[in-house]
Image (spheres, rainbow, N blue to C red):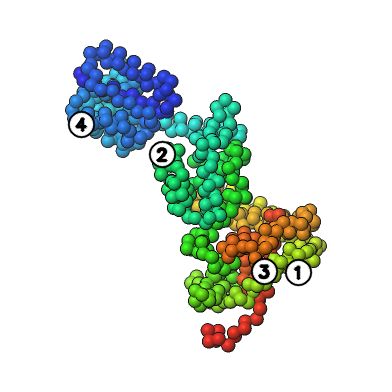
Amino acid sequence: MRAAIYIRVSTKMQEDRYSLAAQHTELSRYARSQGWKVIGEYKDVDSGGKLDKQGLNALLDIVEEGRIDVVLCIDQDRLSRLDTIAWEYLKSTLRDNGVKIAEPGSVTDLTNEDEEFISDIKNLIAKREKKSIVRRMMRGKRQRMREGKGWGKAPLGYKYNKDEQKYELDEQWSWVIPTIDELYLKKQLGMSSIASELNKISRTPSGHLWNETLVHRRLVSKAFHGVMEKTFSNGETITIEGIYPPLRTEETWKQIQEERVKRGSQYKVTSRQKNDLHILRRTHIVCGECGRKINLTAHGTKTAPRYYLKHGRQLRLKDETVCDISINTVRFEHKIIQAIKAILSGEEQAKKYIDIEYDDEKVAFMENQFNQNTKNISKLNEKLDNLLDLFLDGLFSKDSLSKKQLQIKNELDNLLIQNEDLEAKILLLKGQVDGYESIYELFEAAEGFETELTPLEKAQLIGRLFPSGLLHRDHLELQCRLKNAPISVDIPISEDPYPWHSTKRK
């Protein structure tokens, strides 16, 4: 009888140590003892749950060519641990060509219904064992991370020291992340342009060309400021701080994420390298009257542009309300620069724009709000716990459960953010954080704002100082964070010098 030997292991480690050689020796000896002629030997180092394997595909080719009568493997689970559809396809290929499955000591004829049934049971058991193995592996990986130990392939720029059991910098590739950061933040290049610049220096460690996806992964990953974070199939996310030597700071990572959001929602690619940017181009502004986004819109000509803060459309489609707020930036732009100068000139001047004076009533109000939020957080957590019981009692459908869970989680997130802000603001007002010194440190980067910076650098600086703002008809509230506490700088807006213009007639 003509036989083909099929051997498989699941990992490279097994291949190197024992499994392939052991299977080869035992199966070759068994084939000789049966007087079978071995036509070929096929092997895979891969998961049994996949039908698309190089060795198995080559084996199926000779099956369909009618060159063998039996496939010999150490155990049927070496041949496959396939899902139902893939297993049926594999069986039908063997059955249609009259090929049996053999293990040392037994032969299964798939044309015999009883033997096929036994074979199906073996495949089912192998599938269950595969799932059990995966579950045990994931439990082990989760526990390893809970103990502060990492696992998995080292990210680009690192290597794993087996002797000391820790990740170290790979000097050959540690230059990549700082280069990407400089091109993205300082030179304002997009991901495609960054990939082109990297390709001028070197290909990837695997020899492929850099592309946008590879650059994007390096921009969003927390690994490069030392964090290993993995989310498992049970929904649990485990984070280990400081497991990698940092190639960028956490602050730089946050700047990159803010820049990504702004590039996606606030300004076009073409504006990044312009030299005539408006200073508010990188500040996200919303309307103080209706809560909708405010656009910075250019009118006039290229040589004499006029900028307005206004809605993209006055009509709100959701409820058909109208908000016609529209402010020419000449009415307040110079006052932003005045405010920065005043804040840097001394504490007394800073107090005109930033209110961090202690006030008993203000602090008491914030503390009361904090306590109320804490109670509400506790109640929402109880609701979240009770939802599953209600679902199991048949009071909710699965879709209703998901919607209610999402709604409660959103409320929880909002309350938690509010409490973080309140706690930081209370500490600031109580003087447990240095007041003006902290303000000066925050605004110190703006010294020489008018004379030393290009328009692009001014827009970047204002965007970092004031990531967000709230527009009212009489003032612009520029928002920033001081020692993690939210504070605002109020910029007054001058009276409209052109109330007579035709566009403003009701």
Residue 242 appears left or right of 66: right
Q: Amino acid at mark 2?
A: Gly
Q: Amino acid at mark 4?
A: Glu
- Image quarter hosting the C terminus: bottom right
Q: Residues within 10 Å of mark 1 (few under 14, many from 20)?
A: few
Residue furthest to the front: 451
Q: Which residue is mark 4?
A: 64
* Mark positioned earlier in the residue sequence (3 or 2): 2
Front residue of 73/467: it is 467
Q: Which residue is mark 2?
A: 207
**Mark 4–mark 2 distance (CA, rounded to whole Å):** 37 Å
Image quadrant assignment for residue 36: top left
Q: How many marks?
A: 4
* Mark positioned earlier in the residue sequence (4 or 2): 4
Mark 2 residue element: loop
Mark 1 residue element: loop
**Mark 3–mark 2 distance (CA, rounded to whole Å):** 50 Å
Front residue of 133/161: it is 161
**Which label sits in the foreground, 4 or 2?**
2
Q: Amino acid at mark 1?
A: Lys
* Mark positioned earlier in the residue sequence (3 or 1): 3
Q: Which residue is mark 3?
A: 337
**Mark 3–mark 1 distance (CA, rounded to whole Å):** 14 Å
Residues under numbered marks 4 and 1 in contact, where contact means CB atoms less than 8 Å apart: no
Q: Position of residue 276 (x, y in %)?
A: 54, 68
